[in-house]
Structures are given as C-alpha cells and as structure tokens.
C-alpha cells in the first residue's frame, strides 16, 4: 500500500463533576459545539455529540496519530474553559476526571449516532444501553 489507510471510530462518554446536572439546556449546544470544534482541530471527524445534563457522548472518526487520552483531555478542557471563562464565569462547571472509550465498527456507526442524538429519549424511556453509559 503506497499510503496509510485507517478507519478508526471511537465512542467516548464522560460525566460532569459528581454527576451534577451541569450541562443545562442554556449551555448544552455551546458545550457540544466546543467539543466538536476541538475534535475537528485535532483532525477528527465528528459524527455525533449528545448527552443529558450529567454526561456527554461523542462519536468520532479519529487519526492514528492522536491518543484517546489526548483527544478526550483536550475536548473536556476546551469546553470547560469556555464555560468557566466566557459563558458562565460565575457558575461552577467541571468534568469528572475519568471517561469511557469504546472502539466502534463501521457497521454500527448509524446505530450509535442515533443513540447519542436521542439521549433525552433513551434516558426518559429507560431504553439505555448499559455498556454505553457510565
């Protein structure tokens, strides 16, 4: 093969500090946009970002030069910095230190993306996939 070829898909999940409902409706889109922007700057293709007030899901295609810990650390850091320094400097906002990361088959991308986009529904109807929740 004359050049590298990769198809690396990752489903990431992380929570807010002490699972507090910090990703409120008024900042939800801002948080998701900040995460997506950082991921794009790192060379990722963002497929889906979603969640509820106490956690976030992210589905991406990512380059092999990027480590999972670097990706998630920068996505969490940039979104947290934006909220605490520009959007709501008077309010507490913080992510937990840990995260979940799951490799994804290309065949399952649509299923996982739909799951992420419909987090409110899944949590309200209790139709969660436990392996994908933290």
Image (cartoon, grey):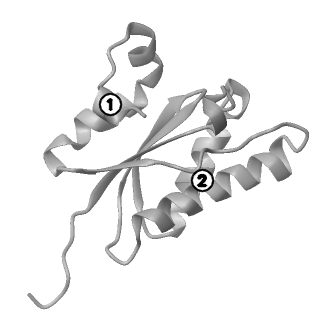
Q: Is residue 48 above or below residue 19?
A: below
Using the rendered view, name the quadrant where residue 134 is placed. Answer: top left
Q: Tell which of 46 and 126 is nearer to you.
A: 126
Residue 18 falls left or right of residue 67:
right
Q: Tell which of 132 and 115 is nearer to you.
A: 132
Give the percent coordinates (x, y) of residue 17: 65, 38
Q: Tell which of 45 and 75 is nearer to you.
A: 75
- Report how many numbered discs are placed on residues in the image: 2
Q: N-terminal of the two: label 2 or label 1?
A: 2
Identified at 24% across, 43% down, the residue is: 109
Identified at 60% across, 53% down, the residue is: 76
**Label 2 close to label 1 by CB (< 8 Å):** no
Q: Is residue 16 above or below residue 121?
A: below
Q: Residues within 10 Å of mark 2 (few under 14, many from 20)?
A: many
Give the percent coordinates (x, y) of residue 98: 51, 49
Residue 45 falls left or right of residue 105:
right
Give the label, 2 or 1, closer to the camera.
Answer: 2
Q: Which mark is residue 46?
A: none
* Spatial CA span between label 2 and label 1: 22 Å
Which residue does the numbered mark 1 point to in the structure image?
A: 114
Identified at 74% across, 55% down, the residue is: 81
Residue 132 falls left or right of residue 19:
left
Give the percent coordinates (x, y) of residue 8: 26, 62
Q: Residue furthest bottom?
A: 2
Can you say which quadrant of the picture contains the N terminus? bottom left
Q: Residue furthest left?
A: 1
Asked which secondary structure carries label 1, the reply is helix
Asked which secondary structure carries label 2, the reply is helix
Identified at 17% across, 50% down, the residue is: 105
Q: Residue furthest top?
A: 125
Q: Residues within 10 Å of mark 1 (few under 14, many from 20)?
A: few
Which residue does the numbered mark 2 point to in the structure image?
A: 76
């Amino acid at each position: 093969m004359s050049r590298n070829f990769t198809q690396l898909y990752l489903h990431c999940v992380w929570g807010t500090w002490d699972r507090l409902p910090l990703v409120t409706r008024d900042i939800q889109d801002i948080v998701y946009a900040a995460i997506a922007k950082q991921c794009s700057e790192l060379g990722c293709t963002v497929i889906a970002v979603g969640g509820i007030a106490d956690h976030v899901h992210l589905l991406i295609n990512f380059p092999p030069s990027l480590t999972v810990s670097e990706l998630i650390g920068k996505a969490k850091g940039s979104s947290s910095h934006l909220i605490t320094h520009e959007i709501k400097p008077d309010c507490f906002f913080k992510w937990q230190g840990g995260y979940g990361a799951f490799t994804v088959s290309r065949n399952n991308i649509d299923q996982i993306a739909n799951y992420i986009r419909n987090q409110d529904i899944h949590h309200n109807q209790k139709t969660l996939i436990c392996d994908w929740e933290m």
